[in-house]
Image (cartoon, rainbow, N blue to C red):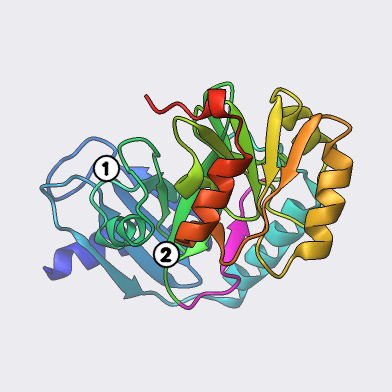
Amino acid sequence: MPNDIYTYIKQLNIPIDDTLRMDCPICNGYNTFTVTNSMGLLLYNCYKASCNVSGKSKIRITMEDIQKKMHKDQADKSIPNLGTELPEYIVSHTDRTEVKQFAEKYDINLDKLDLQYDVKEHRVVFPIRDNGAIVDGVGRSLGKRLPKWKRYGNTGLPFTFGCGKVAVVVEDCISASVIGGDVYVGVAVLGTSLSDLHKKYLSQFSTAIIALDPDAIPKTISFAKELRQYVKDTKVLKLKDDLKYLNTEDIMNLYSLTPKEKLVWK
């Protein structure tokens, strides 16, 4: 990488934790180049498939920079995130090899699920939509960064995927993405309880199947009891393994709990 790219990005004077999105200085791609200042580490990348510009460079940070960052963090805590949009450092996955490998591992169809990518924290991001617009997201670390899962907004909405007529309630976005499709809508509650927003969303279904992880039996029973007030035909699927792994016995049991008239693949 030529030294002039380092000089160029350093002269941008990007504040700590901010991301600048712009035309690529190398390939001139429109709005395809991002630079993020992660506590003095500048991460830059062009998302145009034909451009291979990416890398990182350290810059010196001052006590004033750190103080500004602390003030910003305090301000962020006091202002509620309404979930209107994701941060600029979350971009389309385009041809990120790590995202493709992640999707292949769990057999996630990238043509149907528009996964995003967190440039700053190296996460694959599952977008949460409301009326077609992305209003929130959940990131899953692709490395060793903790926490493994991160929620970007506080909309409280579940992550959902699929266009079927039977809701399958799961714990995480991967399971929802794997099971969602023509027959089922995967609904990831992303927490330890069913909120009013969860119940409101699920009330549109005539059948819901609770399929939480095998070690969550008490929570499964609690969910089923609550949800039957909103979805009369609420059933419990006792899993042998996490649903994301598509254990054959678990899938056959899922089919057996599904009304036959709704087992229709397009």
Q: Is residue 255 left or right of residue 181?
A: right
**Nearest to viewer (mark 2 / mark 1):** 2
Location of mark 1 (residue): 32
Q: Which residue was labeled with disc 2?
A: 122
Image coordinates for residue 42, horizontal then vertical, percent: 37, 67
Q: Quadrant of the C terminus?
A: top left
Residue shown at the point (18%, 58%) measured from the top left: 53
Asked if 200 appears above or below 212 in the picture, the reply is above
Tell me: 234 left or right of 61: right
> Is disc 1 placed on a helix, strand or loop?
loop
Circle 2 sits in a helix, a strand or a loop, which is it? loop
The x, y position of residue 212, in whole percent, is: 68, 57
Q: Quick check: 173 left or right of 231?
A: left
Q: Residues within 10 Å of mark 1 (few under 14, many from 20)?
A: some
Q: What residue do we see at 67% from left, 69% from top? A: 67
The tag on residue 108 is none
Locate residue 90 relative to residue 225 in the image: left or right: left
What main secondary structure does the magenta stretch of the protein show?
Answer: loop
Q: Earlier in the sequence, mark 2 or mark 1?
A: 1
Amino acid type at mark 1: Thr
Q: Which kind of residue does numbered mark 2 sit on?
A: His
Q: Which residues are magenta?
A: 144-153
For residue 205, what is the image quadrant?
Answer: top right
Q: Which quarter of the rendering shows the N terminus?
A: bottom left
